[in-house]
Structures are given as structure tokens and as C-alpha cells.
Amino acid sequence: MIAGWVLLGVILGPTGPRDQYPPRLRTVLDSQRATTSQVEWTATWIGGRDAGLVERYVTRKAGDALWESNLGDENRYHPTGYRAGPRGSPEEELPQPEITKDGPRIMDEERLRKYEIPKEELAGTRNSLIYDAQAWHLSYAERPLTGIVQPLETTRAWLPVDLPSIGLAPCWLHDLDANPFHVPNQQFEGFDSATFREGRENGLPTLSAEWGGSSRLTWRFDDRQGGKPVRAAFERDGVPMYSSETEYERIGERWFPKSVRFYQGDSASPYKMIDIQRATFDEPWHMQEITPTDIGALYGTQFSGPDGVKMWGGADLIPDKEFWDLVELYDVPPDPRITEMIAAPQQTADQLQESWHRRMVWRREEYRKKYGEEPWLVKASPKEKDEWDVYVEKFLGEHKLPEPGVKRANEIRDQAKKLRDGYRRKNAAELRKAKAENDSRKVAHFEGIEKNIFDRVLVRSLEKLVHDEKDAPKKEP
């Protein structure tokens, strides 16, 4: 029984800014975070169709970037996925869950089995990333042909779990809900106008948020564990819907979650658990920078977003048209692995490259007729030896990679140089004009493109290659 409630009278504005949250809530959400961290953890499914599934996760932080890698279980499997039937058929629409006091319940189990996707089809690593104020997601990191990118402020799915504040979440419907407390978005609507009240329960301080006339979210805090939330519970019309219990351990000067148990309704048995195996903070061996390349994006990975389709250019997202201009006018093909993925199974990679070559011949001829120019023929100033070749030679001499690693390093070098030279040819005329006009801003822009390719396409890819080689399982002698 909750007693001793004190009305705080905090009514959030239309955008619900955190600075208007009560102090206890702000302390958890805005507590000082490590500059870098790495957390290894698992998510265990206890009930339902995926009972016994244990997904393995690694969450890495570097500055403002946060990368969550879901490795799946030991077979790389994930929770059961479903697909709709043919358009217009009785099976087109999936059965909808019924919300009961015990939480969501599937109405027709037998029918639902018809929609199941074999787990082998969905097996693999799923990567989610917060980078450059955007939410990035690759559902199949081992086959990164396509991905999703959304502005961080509007995204509603695929966000990494904020482990330091997970104790505030009464439930965890991962990949579905992006609000700070993981309450289903439909039920979270109206929280911006919540009224907060303080109280005590079982000798511990509590905070409650009420909104919409029927929703209440209550947190219980433990000052003996750094003032962290040890219980979160969500109710609708006085009926328990979801709740969680969190245990913490002290790591250095910070309290960090050790385990979280999630419950439905008033059940005494959890339906899902999070367990932290290892958490480290601000260690020199942590990743110091994380980009989409680290989570698996290749030159030519296609990302869908609110502004349409863009392509990962190795350093930044570039418009679809700019990417295909590089391929078809400036002879900068996608990463060989992307080429193989696009080609299969209808044709070979060589056949696909030949079709691109034929299109390049046609497009160049059309460009000549229209503009009377051949910008792809612009050459860089000759040098005795390419600086990027020298860099890779020194890199290989330092790291002593095995033959497959050397081969891949040379592929990375060749791809980076092709991209660099493609942009040099593409931008040569505009760069000359900018220098003639002493337009330092434009000059810096064009020179910055080449620096980004060097830093992010060449250097970062080589560093990732060395890291992957170190982590690769050793073959038995």
C-alpha cells in the first residue's frame, strides 16, 4: 500500500523537457556517463514461444556514439519473427494481441504459427547505433546490403537500450518503443502532461507520474544504492500492467545495474530478464570512436530514412544519385562484398560489374554530348609513390597480419584510393574555382572530403581489420 503521497505539481510542457522532471528522475536520466564503456550482457526469454532463448549483447560507448550489438544465442538465433500472408488473402493481417491484466496475449496461437519465419532466416548479428544525432540499424550485420537511419529526435524503434537508466523501465518491448521508459508508445501518449507525486513505500522513497486520467508509472528508489530505481510499475485504471525489479552493483564510484527482472500484470514470475556479465568504464582499450563502418556498413550499403534512400560512402551518407554517379561516371564501384550481394543469385559479381561498365560507357558518352566535358579524365598530380600506399605498407609491416588479412588490407587500400580519386576528379573543377576565388570555406569542404576518406575509410577500416583478426578464433594446430 502506497502512503504519504506529496503532490509536486510538476506539469510538463508540450515537449516534456527533462529539465522539468523531478530531481530524482533527472538524476538517473542525466547522471554523468563515462566517456567510453563496454558492457557485456544477456537477455533471457522465460515464457511464451521463445522460452529459454538467451540473446547475447555487447554495448559500447565512445563519446556521443552508442553501439548495441545483439549477437543472438549460441546459434545466432533471435525471438520468433512473423511475416504476413499474400495481399488480399485471409492471412494478410497478423492476429493482433489482446491486452489483458496480465499483459498482451496472442488471440490465436494455431493461426499465428502459419506466419512464423524459420529462425535460420533471421539468424545473425543485429546492430543498432546512435551516431551523429541519428539512430542507425542493420538487421543483418553480416550481410549489410540495406539498413535504416532516422533522426534521433523522431525515431520510434531500433534504439540501443540505455543500460544506466534501465531501472526506470517497467517493461522492455525491445525494438518497438523508443521513449525513455519503454512503455508501449500508444500507452505512453500524454506523458508530456504528467503530474508527479512523491511518497514512500516499504520504507523507500517513491515517485509517481500520472497522465491521461488512467495511466500511472511509479518508481521506487534506494538511496543505499546511489538513489537508483529498484522497482518500476505501470498501471492502467488501477490494474497492474507491467513492472520491473533492478539490482545494482558498485563498480568503482558508480552504481550500475546487475540484473533486471520484467513482469506482466501481477505475476510473481518474470517473463524476461537482463543480466550484466561485465561492465567496464573509461579503459584505454575501449573503442575511442564508433562510426557506421564499425557496425558493418560498407561502401554502398543502402540506408532508408525519412529523406528517402542514401548510401554509405565510407565516411558519410551520400545521396543515391551522387553514389551512382561515382559508380557509373567515375568508375568507383561499391565494396566487392556489396557487389556480390547485389549480384546473387541471378548473376555473378563479374557479370554485374560488366553491366556497370557498359552503363558507364553509355553515361560518359551522354555526358560528353550534353556538357562537352570529360571530368573523369582529370588526373591527380603525379608523385613518386602514393602516400596512401606508403601508409598501408607501414601498417602491414607493423601488424604482421596473416595472408588473408594482408589481402583484405590491400582491398581496403584500393577501395579507399578509388573513392578518393573519384572525388578528386568529380570536384576538380569546383576546387580550382574555389581556390581562384579565395573561397576558403569551399576549399576546406573539398579538402575535408579527402581527409574523411583517409581517416574513416582507410585508417578506421584497417584498425577494425586488426581488431577482428585479434578476436578471430584460433585454429587448432
Image (cartoon, grey):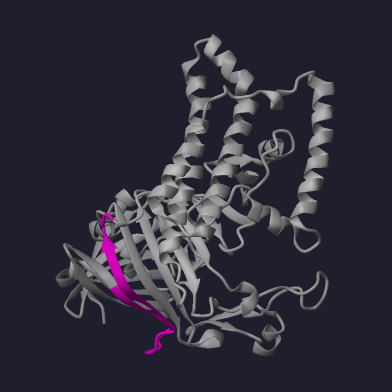
Residue 22 lies within the magenta run: no
Magenta stretch prevailing secondary structure:
strand
Residue 283 lies within the magenta run: yes
Residue at image coords 63%, 48%:
300
In the image, 22: left or right of 88?
left
Point out the image quarter for the C terminus.
Answer: bottom left
In the rendered image, which quarter is residue 282 located in? bottom left
Instruction: Measuring from the top left, give residue 222's x and y in whole percent.
Output: 19, 72
Residue at image coords 72%, 84%:
114
Instruction: Measuring from the top left, give residue 11's x and y in whole percent.
Output: 34, 54
Q: Is residue 382 above or below residue 153?
A: above
Q: Is residue 165 above or below residue 149?
A: below
Residue 313 in view in this figure: no
Point out the image quarter for the N terminus.
Answer: bottom left
Q: Is residue 257 above or below residue 21?
A: below
In the image, 159: left or right of 170?
right
In the rendered image, which quarter is residue 123 located in? bottom right
Number of numbered discs on residues: 0
Q: Residue furthest top?
A: 437
> Residue 402 or 416: which is nearer the viewer?
402
Residue 337 in view in this figure: yes
Instruction: Measuring from the top left, give residue 394's x and y in whole percent.
Output: 42, 43
Instruction: Measuring from the top left, give residue 372's x and y in whole percent.
Output: 79, 18
Residue at image coords 39%, 89%:
269
> Residue 214 or 39: which is nearer the viewer?
39
**Magenta stretch in the rendered image:** 258-284
> Residue 242 or 444: which is nearer the viewer?
444
